[in-house]
Image (cartoon, rainbow, N blue to C red):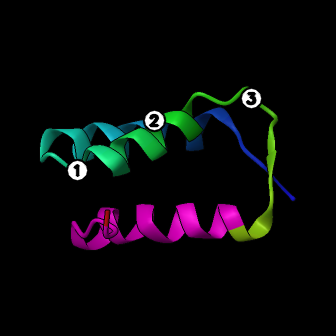
């Protein structure tokens, strides 16, 4: 399990806003939902890695996951 902190939630919210801005609403919804979980929530490693992989692809290459 991975504990999610406020910084990471803020970054996921930023990703969600960018996705909404280009019409990738399902991606925006997914990241908006996970950005709103309470601080200290633990996610399974597999789920965390999936979220981070897509976030990092956006951050580094401006790529979005398939909807």
Instruction: Identify the mark at residue 56; answer none if there is no mark.
Output: none
Residue for point 58% across, 44% down: 8
Please tell me whether mark 2 sits on a helix, a strand or a loop: helix
Above or below, 23 relative to 17: below
Label 2: how many Cα within 10 Å (few below 14, some 14–19, many 20+): many
Asked if the stretch drawn in magenta spans residue 64, the answer is yes
Which residues fall within the magenta stretch? 47-66
Asked if the stretch drawn in magenta spans residue 4, the answer is no
Instruction: Identify the mark at residue 24; answer none if there is no mark.
Output: 1
Residue for point 46% across, 44% down: 31
Q: On the picture, is 5 further left or further right than 36?
A: right
Examine the residues drawn in magenta and state their main secondary structure. Answer: helix
Q: Position of residue 29 (x, y in %)?
A: 40, 39
Quadrant in the picture for residue 38? top right
Quadrant in the picture for residue 28? top left
Label 3: how many Cα within 10 Å (few below 14, some 14–19, many 20+): some
Q: Position of residue 27 (x, y in %)?
A: 36, 51
Please tell me whether mark 3 sits on a helix, a strand or a loop: loop
**Sequence-wise, which precedes: disc 3 or disc 2?**
2
Instruction: Identify the mark at residue 32; answer none if there is no mark.
Output: 2
Please tell me whether mark 1 sits on a helix, a strand or a loop: loop
Q: Residue under circle 3?
A: 39
Residue for point 27% across, 43% down: 25
Q: On the picture, is 33 further left or further right than 28?
A: right
Q: CA distance from mark 3 to mark 1?
A: 26 Å
Above or below, 43 relative to 7: below
Q: Position of residue 35 (x, y in %)?
A: 55, 35
Q: CA distance from mark 3 to mark 2?
A: 14 Å
**Sequence-wise, which precedes: disc 2 or disc 1?**
1
Disc number lying in front (3 or 2): 2
Q: CA distance from mark 2 to mark 1?
A: 12 Å
């Amino acid at each position: 399990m991975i504990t999610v902190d406020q910084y990471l939630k803020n970054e996921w919210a930023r990703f969600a806003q960018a996705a909404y801005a280009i019409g990738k609403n399902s991606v925006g919804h997914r990241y908006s939902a996970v950005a709103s979980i309470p601080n200290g929530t633990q996610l399974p490693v597999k789920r965390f890695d999936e979220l981070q992989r897509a976030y990092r692809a956006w951050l580094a290459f401006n790529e979005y996951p398939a909807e």
